Image (cartoon, helix red, strand yellow):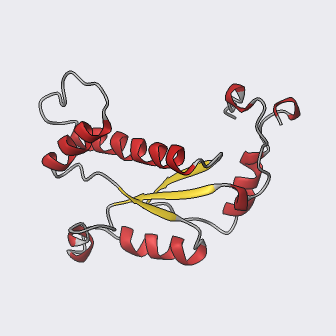
Amino acid sequence: GSALDCSALRGSALPCHLSDVSLVMLTLSVGTDNRTRVAAGKDNRSALLDAALAAYPAIQTIRAVNGHNHTEVIEALLASGLSFHNVSSGGRQWGMLACFLSHVRALLRQVETGAAWQLTMEDDLVPLPSFPSLVDHACGLCPPSHH
């Protein structure tokens, strides 16, 4: 399996339960005009989001950047304060850039809230019944010397 880099965890308490982790879900299904894809039957993410929120009410949603809306992507990039040289190679990378900027939004939320631990998910995640135990397991992956 993959190793978890715990070098940044020195001196911090390692959570041992799902309740210690801030749960964040990136979604286009919240906000002003983004239920249109869902309403048009092109996407079932709204139903998945509703199911995830019903199962785990602690999930906080963050509006994702819509890669189909180039103006929104550019505005999010400018608002991020990140340096950039070339936004897109032939206009084909808007979705990847939007996804990246959505994850930047999630990281900024973690910094703003001071959450020591955050699990960022996308809105097509289907949390299985084993989800809490998987998160608990992930919380315990760092060696005891890093607790």
Q: In x, y percent, where is residue 88? A: 18, 31
**Residue located farthest toward the top when viewing the structure as drawn:** 85
Q: Give coordinates of residue 56: x percent, y percent.
A: 60, 71
Query: Hey, which quadrant is residue 79 in on the image?
Result: top left
Task: State how many labels appear.
Answer: 0
Q: In the figure, is residue 62 to the left or right of 142?
A: left
Q: Please report the residue visible at 83 percent of the width from the left and 37 percent of the height from the top.
A: 147
Residue lying at 49% horizontally and 60% vertically, measured from the top left: 125
40 or 73: nearer the eye? 73
Q: Position of residue 85 (x, y in %)?
A: 21, 21
Left or right placement of residue 94 versus residue 22 in this view: left
State which quarter of the image contains the N terminus.
top right
- Choose top left, top right, bottom left or bottom right for residue 23: bottom right
Measured as percent of width and height from the top left, residue 49 is found at 44, 70
Note whether 59 is above or below 95 in the view shown.
below
User: Compared with residue 136, is residue 129 higher up or lower down, i.e. above or below?
Assistant: below
Q: Which residue occupies 50% across, 64% down?
A: 60
- Among all residues in the image, which is located at the extreme right? 144
